[in-house]
């Protein structure tokens, strides 16, 4: 029962935060794409399917020859290491400064 | 070694590995990327439940007795949680595999795509800080779980053989 209550709290918080984000993005999108037809908004030809940007570029890369390295994973590890390294350096410098001050 | 710490560590390692795989949709494929991300949401709920006491304690004494480290950690965890929600929400909105399979059709929007990329990059930085802040716990618990238990198993096996 206690666990169910906790899960409910997590879901409620998630729904509130997600709802606010959805409302914010919808409001921004509607204000930036409020065009009348033929007033400058890009029109798709009849029968054309909507495709998000970057997709063609990604597909082109997918068809390339060579070894497919998990670049995203390497990027993730590097970025996390950099962030963690910077934090550790700051903590280490703080401790060193404290030791120097007390000595 | 408490079972709780062992469970936490194993769950965290699994979540981290899954997180890495989801960070490379071109490597894993879009379907795995989407379904694994949805499963990750479940593991994050379990992660929060396992650390519930810490969350409640720090929330109660955030403005009174908490150390600066605990406060920074708390704020960082909230940022990671909010960013995680943004990643999930934007991912659901641009889903091409999981949502259509579930019969849910969502309107396309450029903004969600950009938000998804941006929030994923921010999550990497916050996750790096999150791991760095808990590094001592990770190393200590890892040694206890994987090395102490191995020694115990070896000793038990040796005794049985004698």
Image (cartoon, rainbow, N blue to C red):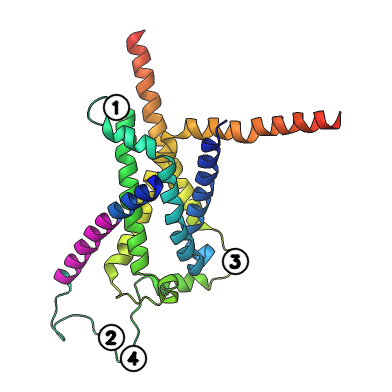
Which residue is painted at 37% across and 75% down in the image? Answer: B104
Q: Residue reaching furthest top?
A: A103
Q: Residues within 10 Å of mark 4 (few under 14, many from 20)?
A: few
Label 1 – label 3 distance at C-alpha: 53 Å
Label ID, residue A44: 2
Circle 1 — which element?
A: loop
Mark nearer the viewer, 1 or 3 = 1
> Which residue is label 1 attached to?
B66
Residues rendered magenta in the picture: A15-31
Give the residue at x 70% y 30%: B152
Mark positioned earlier in the residue sequence (3 or 4) = 4
The vertical placement of B65 against B113, above or below, is: above
Residue A42 sits in quarter: bottom left
Q: Is residue B87 above or below residue B78?
A: below
Numbered label attached to residue A66: 3
The residue tagged 4 is A47
């Amino acid at each position: 029962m206690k666990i169910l209550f906790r899960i409910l709290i997590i879901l409620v918080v998630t729904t509130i935060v997600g709802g606010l984000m959805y409302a914010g993005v919808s409001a921004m999108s509607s204000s930036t794409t409020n065009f009348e037809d033929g007033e400058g908004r890009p029109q798709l030809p009849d029968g054309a399917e909507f495709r998000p940007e970057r997709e063609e570029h990604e597909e082109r890369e997918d068809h390339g020859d060579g070894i497919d390295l998990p670049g995203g994973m390497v990027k993730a590890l590097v970025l996390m290491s950099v962030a963690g390294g910077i934090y550790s350096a700051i903590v280490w410098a703080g401790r060193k400064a404290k030791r120097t001050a007390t000595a | 070694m408490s079972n709780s710490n062992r469970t936490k560590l194993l769950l965290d390692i699994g979540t981290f590995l899954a997180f890495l795989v989801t960070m490379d949709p071109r490597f894993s494929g879009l379907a795995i990327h989407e379904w694994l991300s949805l499963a990750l949401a479940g593991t994050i709920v379990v992660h929060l439940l396992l650390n519930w006491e810490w969350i409640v304690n720090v929330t109660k004494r955030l403005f009174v007795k908490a150390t600066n480290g605990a406060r920074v950690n708390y704020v960082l965890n909230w940022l990671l949680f909010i960013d995680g929600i943004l990643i999930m929400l934007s991912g659901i909105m641009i889903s091409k595999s999981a949502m259509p399979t579930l019969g849910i059709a969502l309107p396309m929007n450029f903004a969600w795509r950009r938000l998804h990329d941006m929030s994923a990059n921010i999550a990497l930085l916050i996750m790096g800080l999150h791991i760095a802040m808990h590094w001592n716990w990770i190393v200590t618990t890892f040694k206890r779980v994987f090395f102490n238990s191995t020694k115990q198993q070896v000793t038990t096996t040796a005794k049985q053989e004698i």
